[in-house]
Amino acid sequence: MFYEMRTYTLQPGKLKEYLRHFEAEGLPVISRYATLVGYWHTEIGELNQLVSIWAYDSLDERSKRRAALYEDQDWLTNFVPKTVHLLLHQESKLLLATSFSPIQ
């Protein structure tokens, strides 16, 4: 199993706006293409960040699903244009579970 950890740094004061829109418009669409493991926001340390982890069976599956998401008109017209101005930075990391990890 492959896990993708995505970290978004938002404009100060825009966290709640982004979360409301993601829950209402983004999550239903992206859930067609990826399995959400967890979604968090920072409270201590670097603030105004969201961290999500998505599960994929393989890197090929991830590539295919992300490509399909980027062609989904609901994503492209109802979610992205309403949130892109709220973002300062995006980061994506692919994670592999160790043999002793509780999550495989």
Image (tube, grey):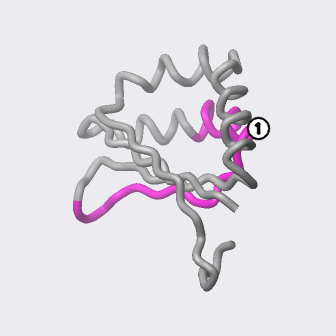
Say if 82 sits above or below 28 in the image.
above
**Percent position of residue 87, x then y:** 35, 31
Count the numbered circles shown.
1
User: How far across and down, in percent of the image, does residue 51 sit?
Assistant: 44, 53
Q: Which residues are magenta?
A: 23-45
Query: In the rendered view, would you say 76 is above or below 10?
Result: above
Seen as rendered, the residue at the extreme bottom is 100
Q: Nearer the viewer, residue 58 or 19?
A: 58
Horizontally, is 24 left or right of 95 in the view?
A: right
As drawn, is 57 to the left or to the right of 88? right
Identify the image quadrant of residue 10: top left
In which quadrant is the C terminus drawn?
A: bottom right
Q: Which residue is mark 1?
A: 32
Query: What amino acid is labelled 1 in the image?
Result: Arg
Image quadrant assignment for residue 65: top right
Looking at the image, which is closer to me, 100 or 7? 100
- Location of the N terminus by quadrant is bottom right
Within the magenta stretch, is there residue 31? yes
Element under label 1?
A: loop
Q: Residue at 44% across / 36% down in the picture? A: 18
